[in-house]
């Protein structure tokens, strides 16, 4: 066997299996030293990691690529892996959950470090990442995304003050994908509740982006006693204008997504053409995360069902979105993208009418503030979390409280 590159040996020696999650029970992570045209596989089975020379006939679950200088920097600096990825010096492809999990497991070991895990809740398995040790903040991702979209947010907000938790919603990422299932806001909100129950968290701030923002609103409506505050980033909302395709879309069943519509190469090509900035490292990794779920039968069903529900949600009427929004209690911060074409800032005036007491922040960006303008976005969130009244104690309800909540008739 060829001599292992010393920097990779250093990383392997630091591996901590307690913060690493391999959904399949094992993982093969390829570590490529680009300027030496060499690669080794970190093979992880049962909490043990072994390095072996990469072989073409063995497909890696995840690929990390960097030149020798960057690998040496990561080996010297226990925080260097994420910094290298965020600046584009380290590439992660195929599976961001495994790639970032590897960096976390071979990085710093101080309390509150980034950690990955899969929890068995009363509804099913939930994949999550977390960091920090303080008051809990639950993050809910958008349509087609995963918990990985919040990596910059976790890095910015996790501290002794805030325990930041990002989950894969059911149907996405590495969380279970029930079939059949409604994949609507009440369904997603109940899974978020089940995660907090399993973690023994009685109250939390909840932050949602896009579709996750709509889920966060639903969580707040269902659980005013558990919601310390809501942060709603470019949240999905019921259309007020005429939905001319609604009658046709009601006839289309998302369960048809169980059939493979096209080969991966075709789907990937389409996604790369329609997603702006597909050459950016973050965007490429995000596309990989989307494809990882979408190219599975149940992942497609979840995506189609969730998208269909967003478009078809009734804006008015006794159970309509806008009358229900007026019932939302507690503090809420809405973050709008000035150049957002998916959830235009024009929705703000309707929110101000429904919730006169809500706070608002406008960021000069499109639909993804935490990636497009992270400094400004995270500063606004931090100010909201520090507001008077935000430091109320959080009781750990534990399994007894969780069982009582599970018995409620929804």
Image (spheres, grey):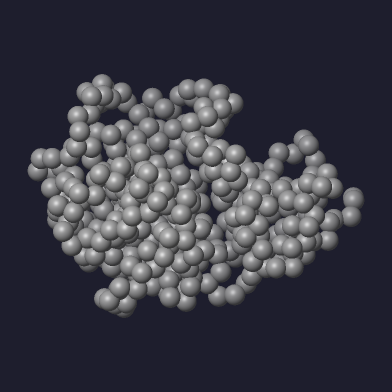
Q: Residue furthest left?
A: 318
> Residue at coordinates 30% horizontally, 42% vertically from top-left?
344
> Residue at coordinates 9% horizontally, 43% vertically from top-left?
318
Identify which residue, 156 or 187, lies in the foreground.
156
Asked where in the image residue 72 lies, by quadrant, the reply is bottom right
Left or right of 17, for residue 34 = right
Res. 29 in view = no
Could you say where residue 235 lies in the image, as x and y percent from the top left?
A: 31, 48
Could you say where residue 319 lies in the image, as x and y percent from the top left?
A: 14, 43
> Residue at coordinates 61% horizontally, 59% vertically from top-left?
82
Could you say where residue 334 lies in the image, as x and y percent from the top left?
A: 29, 56
Left or right of 92, for residue 322 = left
> Residue at coordinates 56% horizontally, 69% vertically from top-left?
113
Could you say where residue 270 lies in the image, as x and y percent from the top left?
A: 52, 27
Identify which residue, 121 or 99, lies in the foreground.
99
Res. 106 in view = yes
Q: Is residue 410 above or below residue 332?
A: above
Q: Is residue 125 above or below residue 171?
A: below
Q: Is residue 162 above or below residue 346?
A: below
Left or right of 349, for residue 135 = right
Q: Residue furthest right?
A: 2
Identify which residue, 181 or 14, lies in the foreground.
14
Mark count: 0
Asked where in the image residue 9 lies, by quadrant, the reply is bottom right
């Amino acid at each position: 066997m060829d001599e292992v590159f010393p920097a990779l040996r250093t990383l392997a020696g630091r591996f901590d299996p307690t913060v690493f999650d391999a959904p399949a029970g094992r993982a093969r992570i390829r570590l490529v030293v680009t300027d030496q045209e060499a690669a080794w596989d970190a093979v992880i089975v049962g909490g043990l990691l072994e390095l072996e020379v990469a072989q073409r006939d063995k497909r890696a679950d995840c690929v990390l690529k960097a030149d020798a200088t960057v690998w040496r920097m990561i080996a010297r600096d226990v925080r260097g892996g994420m910094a290298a990825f965020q600046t584009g010096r380290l590439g992660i492809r195929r599976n961001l959950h495994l790639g970032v999990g590897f960096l976390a497991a071979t990085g710093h070991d101080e309390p509150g470090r980034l950690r990955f895990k899969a929890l068995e809740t009363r509804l099913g398995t939930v994949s999550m990442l977390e960091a920090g040790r303080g008051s809990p903040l639950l993050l809910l991702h958008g349509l087609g995304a995963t918990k990985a979209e919040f990596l910059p947010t976790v890095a910015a907000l996790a501290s002794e003050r805030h325990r930041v938790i990002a989950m894969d919603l059911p149907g996405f990422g590495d969380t279970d994908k029930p079939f059949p299932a409604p994949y609507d806001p009440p369904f997603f909100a109940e899974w978020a509740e089940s995660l907090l129950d399993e973690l023994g968290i009685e109250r939390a701030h909840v932050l949602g982006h896009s579709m996750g923002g709509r889920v966060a609103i639903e969580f707040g409506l269902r659980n005013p006693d558990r919601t310390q505050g809501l942060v709603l980033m470019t949240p999905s909302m019921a259309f007020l204008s005429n939905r001319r395709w609604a009658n046709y879309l009601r006839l289309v069943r998302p369960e048809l997504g169980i059939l493979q519509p096209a080969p991966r190469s075709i789907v990937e090509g389409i996604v790369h053409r329609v997603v702006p900035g597909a050459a950016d490292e973050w965007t490429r990794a995000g596309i990989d995360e989307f494809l990882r779920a979408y190219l599975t039968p149940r992942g497609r069903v979840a995506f189609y069902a969730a998208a269909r529900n967003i478009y078809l949600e009734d804006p008015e009427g006794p159970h309509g979105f806008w009358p229900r929004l007026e019932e939302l209690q507690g503090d809420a911060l809405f973050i709008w993208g000035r150049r957002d074409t998916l959830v235009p800032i024009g929705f703000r005036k309707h929110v101000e009418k429904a919730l006169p007491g809500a706070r608002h922040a406008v960021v000069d960006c499109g639909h993804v503030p935490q990636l497009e303008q992270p400094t400004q976005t995270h500063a606004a969130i931090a100010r909201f979390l520090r507001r008077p009244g935000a430091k109320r104690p959080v009781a750990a309800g534990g399994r007894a409280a969780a069982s009582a909540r599970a018995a409620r008739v929804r």
